[in-house]
Image: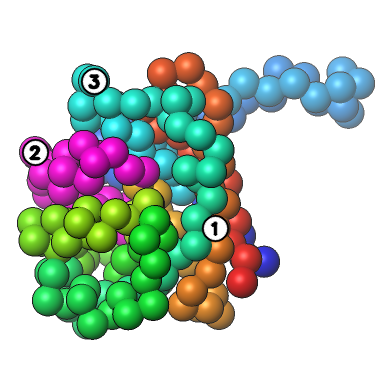
Amino acid sequence: MWDLTYTISEDMLLYPGTPQPKLHDFATPAKDGYGMSEFTFWNHLGTHIDAPNHFHADGRSLDQFPLNAFIRRVVTVDCQETKEITEAFLKPRLAQYQTGDGVLLLTGQYRFWGTRDYFRPFPVLSDDGAEFLLEKHVGMILTDAPSVDPVSTETFPIHRRLLRAPLLIVENLAYQPDLPPIFHVTALPLKIKNSNGSPARVIAAS
């Protein structure tokens, strides 16, 4: 098994403009005989899942998805040698794809986690690439990058298109180089009412 989840901490790397988490211990076993803590952080940090209502007012929230939506067979597409993930790029690389699978867009950004280089330009889906995946009835999009859109965007067109489907997007995946190209993933968010996104514990198995 592989843990594809980054650890949440007060000094973790965050998407530009996101406030740092606060992890406060109200009590500790050494001082009080028990431990009790307060965690304060935005819901789209670290390894997390985006729900359709992240961008669409009428979209489903995470708690409205069935459990099997978070468990997928995943096919990896190595995108490290391209700048844009187009339909033409994807087609020959999805020969083993099956309807409903998740697709991991491996950009190589995982190598820069913890540094500012993590937010430098990375491969993203083109319009026709996103449409192609939707036509293939992809069940989940995963990426080791901070977003499925460029960090510079102010309109988030790829997010909007994919989440309208609707499907789930997993971002900031802590990719492991020994992960097989096809694997099974369980990506479980916190079960919070009307949540538009949540940190997730993402576990892969061969």
Q: CA distance from mark 3 to mark 1?
A: 27 Å
Query: In this figure, which residue is indicated by the disc labeled 1?
Result: 185
Instruction: Residue 58: give its label.
Output: 3
Instruction: Residue 199: give its label.
Output: none
Q: Is residue 169 left or right of residue 173?
A: left
> Residue visible at 23% across and 20% down?
58
Q: Position of residue 57 (x, y in %)?
A: 22, 20
Indicate the quadrant where residue 179 lies: bottom right
Q: Is residue 202 left or right of residue 115?
A: right
Q: CA distance from mark 1 to mark 2?
A: 30 Å
- Of callouts 1 and 2, the N-terminal one: 2
Query: In this figure, which residue is indicated by the disc labeled 2?
Result: 155
Q: Which residues are magenta?
A: 144-168
**Residue 160 showing in the rendered view:** yes
Disc 3 element = loop
Q: Viewer-nearest of labels 2 and 3?
A: 3
Q: Amino acid at mark 2?
A: Thr
Q: Is residue 106 magenta?
A: no
| Tag 1 and tag 2, C-beta contact below 8 Å | no
Of the pair 154 and 29, the residue shown nearer to us: 154
Q: Position of residue 95 (x, y in %)?
A: 32, 80
Indicate the quadrant where residue 124 lies: bottom left
Q: CA distance from mark 2 to mark 3?
A: 18 Å
Q: How is the image coloured?
A: rainbow
Q: Is residue 23 left or right of residue 115?
A: right
Q: How many marks?
A: 3
> Residue visible at 49% across and 62% down?
73
- Of callouts 3 and 1, the N-terminal one: 3
Indicate the quadrant where residue 117 lies: bottom left
